[in-house]
């Protein structure tokens, strides 16, 4: 039997009344055995043990949450100091871990807030700019952008005139006087500049098989202009100071900044929703001009063939993927069944657009 100085009493909801036990101390837990028959009673993690009471005669410990299991150890017990030290040490380690995690979590939270605030501010400035920048200012900006990049483009003036005549048979915009430029380059690309400039590369023209495909392309790019998608994208790229200058000041003062952005503007990328909207608006333009929107599906077929797994710029942006855009176009046609016949005048101009330039002979 244990003497009074070394007694350990264990009281549990399952053991009543309290009984004398023997305690063994391990790194992470204590084990209890019946003092009379040495039968195993249970094991308790040190991390969960809490000191309830301590005086000159004994220490009372709760072994489980809810105080369902209580251990009373004589103050003279040889293991009591180490048990108390282990209990405090385990709790301190837990506190230290929590303290160590505290600052990284705070830092991540602050960083997330700053990122959200940054993009929120950009979105706000963009929205404000779209409301404050007039169409006249937008046209002025577009002219500046176009002229800043024109020196780097090999413009085909004869094809540009043919494309202008082709587009002249279409109603593409009510708010903007559109300008059309053909670039003598095999790159498969086309892009819209705020205010009305549409630039088309020979590479994409050469891939087309039908005039309806060209109408689909022009409708898509005109929609970017009509819906001010191009302006929105540029406002997001340019600094807030440039935005304020555009709204309240002289656009000439930002010429250097615009020129620096010119190369990036050739590959303007739009969000998935803006690309989808431009596709749909483009097909609506086709229908309003009595052109079969099937041309959009044909255009997507050409783009898929040209893609070859490569991310393409501008109109061929993979946001969304060309295959998905084709599915959306097919669905649009199912919902808007038509049987338009392409006007003869448009077919004539289409042949002129397809004619090689004199420098290609």
Image (cartoon, rainbow, N blue to C red):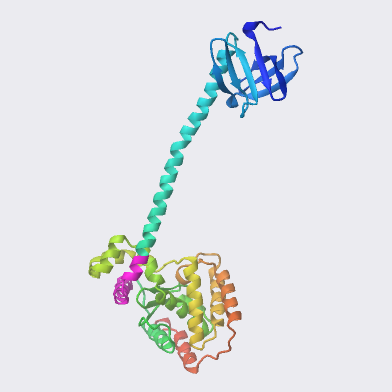
Asked whether residue 141 is drawn in magenta, I would say: yes
User: Position of 91 compared to 264: left or right?
Assistant: right
Q: Give the quarter of the image for residue 256.
A: bottom left
Q: How many marks?
A: 0
Extreme residue toward the bottom, this view: 344
Q: Nearer the viewer, residue 218 or 301?
A: 218
Query: Mostly what secondary structure, the magenta segment?
Result: helix
- Residue 218 at least partly seen: yes
User: Is 226 included in the stretch rendered in magenta?
Assistant: no
Q: Position of residue 274 (x, y in %)?
A: 47, 69
The foreground one among 153 and 243 is 243
Query: Does residue 163 sit above or below 97 in this rendering?
Result: below
Judge whether 60 appears above or below 189 on screen: above
Q: Which residues are magenta?
A: 127-151
Seen at 53% across and 13% down, the residue is 55
Q: Position of residue 171 (x, y in %)?
A: 43, 86
In front: 146, or 51? 51
- Residue 80 in the image: x percent, y percent? 58, 13
Q: Nearer the viewer, residue 314 or 103?
A: 103
Q: Quadrant of the C terminus?
A: bottom left
What residue lies at 57% left-to-right and 10% top-to-bottom? 57
């Amino acid at each position: 039997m244990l003497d009074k100085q070394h007694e350990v009493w264990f009281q549990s909801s399952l053991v009543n009344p309290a009984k004398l036990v023997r305690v063994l101390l391990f790194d992470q837990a204590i084990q209890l055995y019946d003092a009379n028959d040495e039968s195993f009673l249970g094991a308790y993690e040190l991390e969960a043990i809490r000191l309830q009471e301590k005086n000159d005669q004994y220490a009372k410990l709760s072994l489980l949450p809810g105080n369902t299991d209580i251990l009373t150890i004589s103050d003279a017990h040889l293991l009591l100091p180490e048990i108390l030290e282990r209990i405090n040490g385990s709790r301190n380690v837990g506190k230290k871990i929590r303290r160590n995690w505290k600052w990284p979590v705070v830092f991540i939270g602050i960083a997330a807030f700053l990122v959200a605030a940054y993009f929120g501010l950009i979105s706000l400035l963009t929205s404000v700019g779209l409301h404050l920048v007039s169409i006249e200012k937008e046209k002025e900006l577009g002219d500046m952008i176009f002229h800043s990049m024109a020196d780097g483009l090999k413009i085909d003036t004869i094809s540009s005139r043919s494309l202008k005549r082709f587009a002249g048979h279409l109603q593409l915009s009510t708010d903007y006087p559109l300008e059309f430029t053909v670039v003598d380059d095999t790159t498969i690309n086309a892009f819209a500049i705020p205010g009305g400039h549409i630039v088309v590369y020979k590479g994409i023209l050469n891939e087309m098989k039908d005039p309806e495909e060209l109408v689909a392309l022009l409708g898509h790019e005109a929609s970017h202009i009509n819906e001010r998608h191009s302006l929105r994208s540029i406002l997001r790229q340019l600094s807030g100071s440039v935005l304020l200058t555009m709204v309240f000041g002289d656009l000439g003062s930002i010429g250097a900044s615009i020129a620096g952005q010119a190369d990036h503007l050739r590959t303007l990328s739009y969000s998935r929703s803006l690309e989808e909207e431009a596709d749909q608006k483009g097909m609506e333009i086709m229908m309003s001009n009595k052109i079969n929107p099937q041309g959009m599906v044909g255009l997507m077929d050409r783009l898929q063939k040209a893609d070859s797994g490569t991310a393409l710029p501008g109109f061929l942006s993979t946001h969304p993927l060309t295959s998905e855009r084709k599915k959306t176009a097919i669905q649009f046609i199912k919902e808007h069944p038509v049987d338009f016949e392409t006007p003869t005048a448009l077919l004539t101009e289409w042949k002129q657009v397809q004619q090689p330039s004199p420098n290609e002979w």
